[in-house]
Image (cartoon, rainbow, N blue to C red):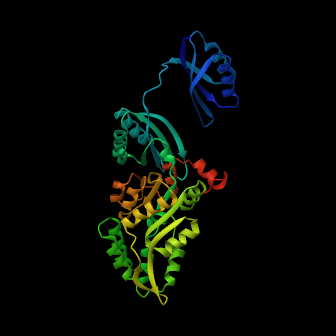
Amino acid sequence: MSTKTILIRIQGPDHPGISAALMELLSSRPCQIEDVEQIVIRGRLNLSLVVDVAADQDLRAELLLLGYEQDVEIDFEEVSSTPSKTSPLVVATLLGPDVTPIDFGTVASTVAANGGNIDRIIRLAKYPVMAYELTISGDDREALRASLLEEAHLLGCDLAVHRFGLSRRAKRLVVLDVDSTLIQDEAIELLADEAGSLLQVAELTDRAMAGELDFASSLATRVETFAGLDAAALDRMNDTLRLAPGARTFIRTLRRLGYKTAIISGGFTSVTDHLQAELGIDYAQANQLEVIDGKLTGRTIGPIVDRAEKADFVQTIAAKEGIPLDQVVAVGDGANDLDMLNTAGLGIAFNARPVVRDAADTALNVPYLDAVLFVLGISREEIVDADTGGVDAA
């Protein structure tokens, strides 16, 4: 039997019964649904179907009557029965305090210049930032990805680009740096303030995080300035720590969605132990300060957590949990995090130094740690459902 392929588009005020009435009409004729997609924006329905029908069937009168009865606009046209050969290659996430037409236009122009097409755009969030996910098809994944990332600096928002596929939402372990990532502070500088060495320590910390100094030797120099400090300063430091905005929501949501979480710090175990207990984090590792007779000695105990140790930590935890490295996400901001970011399947530079932004898979420059969830394709609605059973909370 000869057939033809019809594209049916329905637009108008959404209300119950439209889809049911359309399917009832189609059920009365010999036809086959090949594709269907529906979205409702601000109470307005956009429904599209691709249907194969017998060549001698004419649905025009019935579709027009359906549109009149349901108070919607229906148009239809005969289309090719052969689907487009291109398939989704990459997913781009645009996010920031605002995502403007200029931002969308820059991405669209870049995609078109590389022979690609934006197949779908959905909004993931409007709080605490605007976040949109674009599914992009084409013939050359790497060219698309490279060109989009090259143009990212022209945008007024952040752009993350991933391979399309299940692997993006199959992440199972998230490993975080602590200082200036999970927390807003540099813990070592809080101790230095008590020890009277803040200016010296802050300068060395900044240079180490920028990759200008060897981390281990710079850490030893900074810790020496704590010699003689009362160990109670560690508790006072913990009392003043400020979590990154959205950190509680981020960790809580990951846990409720079944992710394993881990933190590793070039700082100190007194901080990571405190945060692990407070937030319910699965694994934690950091440097241990030596304390004798209630005083800091100005030395550390055991291996130094440098960039190589951080990468080893990622591999060790992943192996222990039986999680492939391509299902691991690492988040950090300093040069000490570079090996960890490169080891994980997805490395995210979070408000990072330029050397880290340039090397990471993607970079976020918003202050909200829970924005990382949008990069993973998790919508605000899913966060609310997982976190509070439907009550939005920051």
In front: 206, or 154? Answer: 206
Instruction: Write the residue at 29% across / 67% down.
Output: 212
| The N terminus: image quadrant | top right
In front: 159, or 330? Answer: 330
Looking at the image, the residue that sits furthest to the top is: 56
Looking at the image, the residue that sits furthest to the bottom is: 293
Instruction: Write the residue at 49% across / 55% down.
Output: 323
Is residue 160 shown above or below 143?
below
Q: Position of residue 50 (x, y in %)?
A: 55, 23
Q: Position of residue 227 (x, y in %)?
A: 40, 86
| The C terminus: image quadrant | bottom right
Instruction: Write the residue at 47% across / 52% down.
Output: 327
Is residue 6 shown above or below 265?
above
In front: 158, or 251? Answer: 251
| Residue 360 lies in quadrant | bottom left
Q: Is residue 272 left or right of residue 24?
A: left
For the question of whether residue 368 can be seen, the reply is no
